[in-house]
Image (cartoon, grey):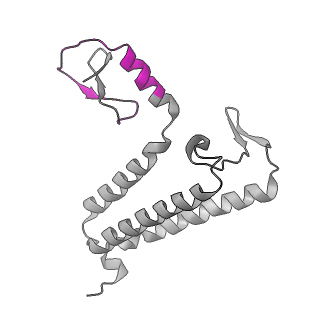
Amino acid sequence: MSQSICSTGLRWLWLVVVVLIIDLGSKYLILQNFALGDTVPLFPSLNLHYARNYGAAFSFLADSGGWQRWFFAGIAIGISVILAVMMYRSKAHAEAKQYRLRADYWRRAGQPVRPPVARLRCRYDRLLRRRLALRHLQPCRYCHLCRCGTDRAGRVFTF
């Protein structure tokens, strides 16, 4: 049974199109107006630097011959199709579920590219962990991925 787009979760698809247009437009502007290696200061503490990364995060697989581009594109297309089907099957009035689905997807999609400082901090803190009482615990405040936490004094431990 077909449903109208407005009665399903696909009514949020316009947001994907807007973000895609902004992303591709900014890449086009950079390619037209910058030479490789150019730097433009945007704010006193933020510069825009044109560099190319032929691999995945932090040039992972950069020297692999080009197959990685199609591999990662296939993964992204597969995930996009799965999410579109999930959004189509859900009702538009299920706002909380739609919000959780989108937020959970973007949180999980962003995990591989979280700042490396957070990951290094967690590994550093794990090396210095102490045996602490397991009360008043909070999840890791840096990456939310590892199985470490803090007590009320801010000391980090792993369990």
In this view, the residue in front, 112 or 43, is 112
Q: How far across and down, in percent of the image, does residue 112 sit? A: 46, 44
135 magenta-colored: yes
Q: Which residues are magenta?
A: 120-145
Where 1 sits versus 16, above or below?
A: below
In this view, the residue in front, 24 or 45, is 24
**Image quadrant occupied by the N terminus:** bottom left
**Image quadrant occupied by the C terminus:** top left
Where 128 sits versus 109, above or below?
A: above
In the visual, does 69 lie left or right of 110? right
Seen as rendered, the residue at the extreme bottom is: 1
Q: How far across and down, in percent of the image, does residue 150 sit? A: 29, 21
Q: Residue at x 43, y 19 (%)?
A: 124
Q: Residue at x 26, y 27 (%)?
A: 138
When asked about the image quadrant of residue 38, the answer is top right
Where 149 sits versus 58, above or below?
A: above
Image label count: 0
Q: Residue at x 45, y 47 (%)?
A: 110
114 magenta-colored: no
Q: How far across and down, in percent of the image, does residue 134 sit? A: 18, 19
Where 111 sits versus 153, above or below?
A: below
SS majority, magenta: loop
